[in-house]
Image (spheres, rainbow, N blue to C red):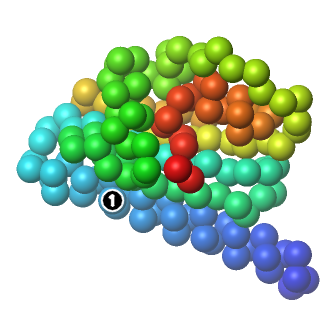
Amino acid sequence: MTHTHTATALRRAARTGLTAAAVLLAAAAPASAGDRSGGDYLYLTVTKGDSRSSDTRGTLLLCDPPQGHGRAAEACAQLDAADGDIGALPAADVFCPMLYAPVTVQARGQWNGRPVGYRQSFSNACLMEARTGAVFALES
């Protein structure tokens, strides 16, 4: 196996492991938060670069109480206002550079007892934050 194939296989295995861990955490999250049925949580990932990139960050966002990343309270408030629909978040009125540095975001979980699935690619992080607010601001 060549170095490229080995690196690709390792990245794929790491992503699979990350996904499996997130599913386990997400399944345990409502029970560990006081056995709330219908607790709001999302497993969020942000991947910088193209589809071959290995620069993926992820976290579990819990919203009762808000926790998961530096802007969890803001993200939960924004999601609450949009009833958990990331695509319905209002776009910020900002000017973003015309720089191509792709970023892909993904969210899986539940909001008000309903499953949430969201995946979107943006041409740069500025556009991503303008469309998704604090939800995918994992580095703050």
Q: Is residue 53 left or right of residue 78?
A: right
Relative depth, front residue between 56 and 19: 56
Q: Residue 72, can we see it?
A: yes
Relative depth, front residue between 106 and 70: 70
Q: Position of residue 8 (x, y in %)?
A: 78, 70
**Amino acid type of disc 1?**
Leu
Which residue sits at x=56%, y=53%?
139
Q: Is residue 42 left or right of residue 119?
A: left
Q: Is 49 located above or below residue 38 in the figure? A: below
* Residue under label 1: 25
Q: Is 14 located above or below residue 120 in the figure? A: below
Kindly indicate the quadrant of the structure image that contains residue 24. bottom left
Q: Position of residue 119 (x, y in %)?
A: 60, 35
Q: Is residue 38 left or right of residue 76?
A: left
* Mark 1 neighbour class, 10 Å CA radius: few under 14, some 14 to 19, many 20 or more: some
Q: Is 32 located above or below residue 133 in the figure? A: below
Q: Position of residue 1 (x, y in %)?
A: 86, 85
Q: Is residue 95 left or right of residue 64?
A: right
Q: Residue 43, can we see it?
A: no
Q: Position of residue 98 (x, y in %)?
A: 88, 29
At numbered mark 1, what does the secondary structure look like: helix, strand or loop?
A: helix
Which residue sits at x=35%, y=33%?
76
- Direction left: furthest residue: 34
Q: Is 40 located above or below residue 51 in the figure? A: above
